[in-house]
């Protein structure tokens, strides 16, 4: 049987639902996956390394490269910084390996649009939405991670409601439960996606 073409697997869903944990485990446990290294203008945290954790860019460099069309998607976050996915971070690696990333729903829309015009992406984007049982369950998860200012918690929950409303536009929806069940669902959906990619 021919090998499946490589794909860009995108996980989306509200903040606090466990996307990063799923991405990390996929890269760790499943051969042939790498994490997409995204770009940010925020300063590195202790132990973070340029080009391993993020591409750390100045605001001027980020804006220059954005305006030159070098990004698949960008977002300005509430703190005033920028995040984005460089085309090179995806298109240079995708011929050689499967890639996984987690971004917000706006970023997913941008990458889907890019896949219509970028030959290296066309037909190779797989989207999964990680959905909490309810916004109340999500509130408990976020609160369990540590104290957040009330206004930040409210902002995240409002964003979550908007994001959850878009879940049915994704290729697959993981109805979040335990970390282990979520990972099993991810692997099941990935197997389905591979069969489709083989055509």
Image (cartoon, grey):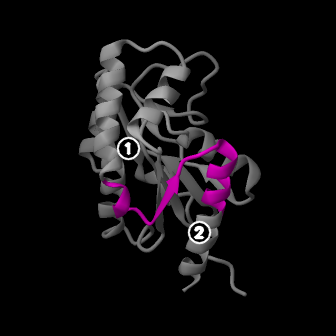
Instruction: Tell me which residue sits at (30%, 36%) in the image.
Output: 159
Q: Taking 114 as reference, is 98 left or right?
A: right
Secondary-structure class at tag 1: loop
Residue at numbered disc 1: 104
Nearest to the observer: residue 2 or residue 20 = 20
Comparing 167 with 70, the one in front is 167
Q: Nearer the viewer, mark 1 or mark 2?
A: 1
> Dot 2 corresponds to which residue?
6
Please state which of residues 38 and 189 is positioned toward the viewer in this rendering: 189
User: In x, y percent, where is residue 153?
Assistant: 36, 22
Judge whether 123 appears above or below 90 on screen: below
Helix, strand or loop under label 2: loop
Give x and y (percent) for residue 38.
Answer: 47, 41
Q: What is the quadrant of residue 148 in the picture? A: top left
The percent coordinates of residue 105 (x first, y second) are 34, 48
In the image, residue 149 sits, relative to residue 106, either above or below, namely above
Image coords of residue 127 (percent x, y): 46, 60
Residue lying furthest left in this view?
Answer: 67
Identify the residue shown where x is 61% and y is 45%: 22
Q: Earlier in the sequence, mark 1 or mark 2?
A: 2
Which stretch appears magenta?
166-187
Q: Which residue is found at the position 28% from the left and 43% from the top?
A: 162
Residue 122 lies in the magenta-colored region: no
* Label 2 packing within 10 angstroms: few (<14), some (14-19), many (20+): many
* Residue ID at (41%, 33%): 136
Left or right, residue 54 beside residue 149: right
Looking at the image, is 19 positioned above or below residue 183?
A: above
* Residue 106 appears in the rendering: yes
Mark 1 and mark 2: span between their CA atoms? 22 Å
**Which quadrant of the rendered structure holds the N terminus?**
bottom right
């Amino acid at each position: 049987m021919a090998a499946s073409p490589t794909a860009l697997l995108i996980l989306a869903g509200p903040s606090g639902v466990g996307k990063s944990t799923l991405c990390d485990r996929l890269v760790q446990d499943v051969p042939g996956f790498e994490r997409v290294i995204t770009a940010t203008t925020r300063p590195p945290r202790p132990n973070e390394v340029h080009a391993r954790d993020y591409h750390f860019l100045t605001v001027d460099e980020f804006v220059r490269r954005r305006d030159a069309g070098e990004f698949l998607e960008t977002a300005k976050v509430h703190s005033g910084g920028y995040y984005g996915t460089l085309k090179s971070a995806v298109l240079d690696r995708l011929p050689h390996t499967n890639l996984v990333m987690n971004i917000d729903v706006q970023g997913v829309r941008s990458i889907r649009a890019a896949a219509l015009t970028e030959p290296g992406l066309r037909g190779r984007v797989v989207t999964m939405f990680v959905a909490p049982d309810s916004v109340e369950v999500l509130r408990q998860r976020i609160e369990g991670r540590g104290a957040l200012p009330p206004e930040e918690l409210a902002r995240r929950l409002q964003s979550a409601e908007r994001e959850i409303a878009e879940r049915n536009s994704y290729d697959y929806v993981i109805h979040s439960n335990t970390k282990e069940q979520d990972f099993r669902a991810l692997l099941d959906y990935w197997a389905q996606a591979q069969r489709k990619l083989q055509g």
